[in-house]
Image: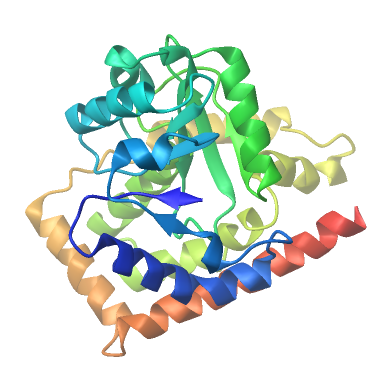
Amino acid sequence: MVATDPAPGAEADLRHYVDKAWPALKAIGLSPKGSPEHLSFSVDLATAVQDADFIQENGPENQQLKTRLFTEMGRAAPPDTIIASSTSGIKMSAIQSACQSPERCLIGHPFDPPHMIPLVEVVGGTRTASEALHAAVAFYASIGKKPILLQKEIAGHAATRLQAALYREVAYLIGEGVLSVRDADTAVSWGPGLRWGIMGPNILLYLANLTGGQGGVPEQLSSSLAALWKDLGQPELTPALRRSIDEGTLQAVGTGPVAQLVKQRDELLLGLLRLRAKYSRDA
């Protein structure tokens, strides 16, 4: 694996990040030859990609910059190399516009922390070949990720939109004085969030309604869901609401070190990943 970044001190920062992440990577599972020693670094972009089989671009969220990077990588990389972008909000159709061989350009959007969260969203642009998309899905799956393939482009892709939909209602409930920031987080993480950590909402709804004999979304529940959707809030993130959320978040976090929260998050993620891996093997 070859990494490249023109920023001063980028190699030292990257190797420090890898060293910190390595215990978690070992717990999740490494390939037989997995080792930090197999990571090399080049400050020159063309040199870094000249022999690449797969390129993952992680530059800043700037469309012009990404378009330039894809153009440069397209010139330097082998003609059959797939070039993927980690962008969370820019459409591939815009990024690939000036790239040589745009049919191999696509989005492979991971989630933070990317070395632990398995999900990767694979999205093509108007000029992306279906063969490249399926090859990317196969590649991500081969390294232990859980790729999903979007059938068409949409702003924010899929999972980010789902996050935004939930947070819109969280902000609405806080702004309306229904819940405090702390209780809103508790409602998500100790309620539906626990279930979503093991199964998706469609399967969970199916299981919840098996007692009715058939699973799925019964007509009575369908009507209540439709009514509730119409009543969901449309909050405006005013300075006052943002200030209220910020203050409530700081109160919930407390005065302890942020590093401790990060450690707690990662340890809980590892536990859940281990449990899910166990049941995947049993299945």
| Residue, far bottom | 256
Nearer to me, 113 or 239:
113
Please name the residue shown 69% across and 56% down the image: 198
Vertically, is 46 above or below 241? above
Please name the residue shown 40% across and 80% down the image: 261
Vertically, is 197 above or below 72? below
Vertically, is 41 above or below 36? above
Q: Where, by quadrant of the figure, is residue 95 drawn?
A: top left
The picture places residue 224, in percent across and down from the top left corner, at 57, 35
Please name the residue shown 16% across and 57% down the image: 241
Vertically, is 31 above or below 209? below
The picture places residue 40, in percent across and down from the top left corner, at 44, 57
Nearer to me, 62 or 215:
62
The picture places residue 37, in percent across and down from the top left corner, at 53, 67
The picture places residue 281, in percent across and down from the top left corner, at 87, 57
Residue 46 visible, this angle: yes
Nearer to me, 48 or 31:
48
What's the colour scheme? rainbow
Nearer to me, 269 or 212:
269
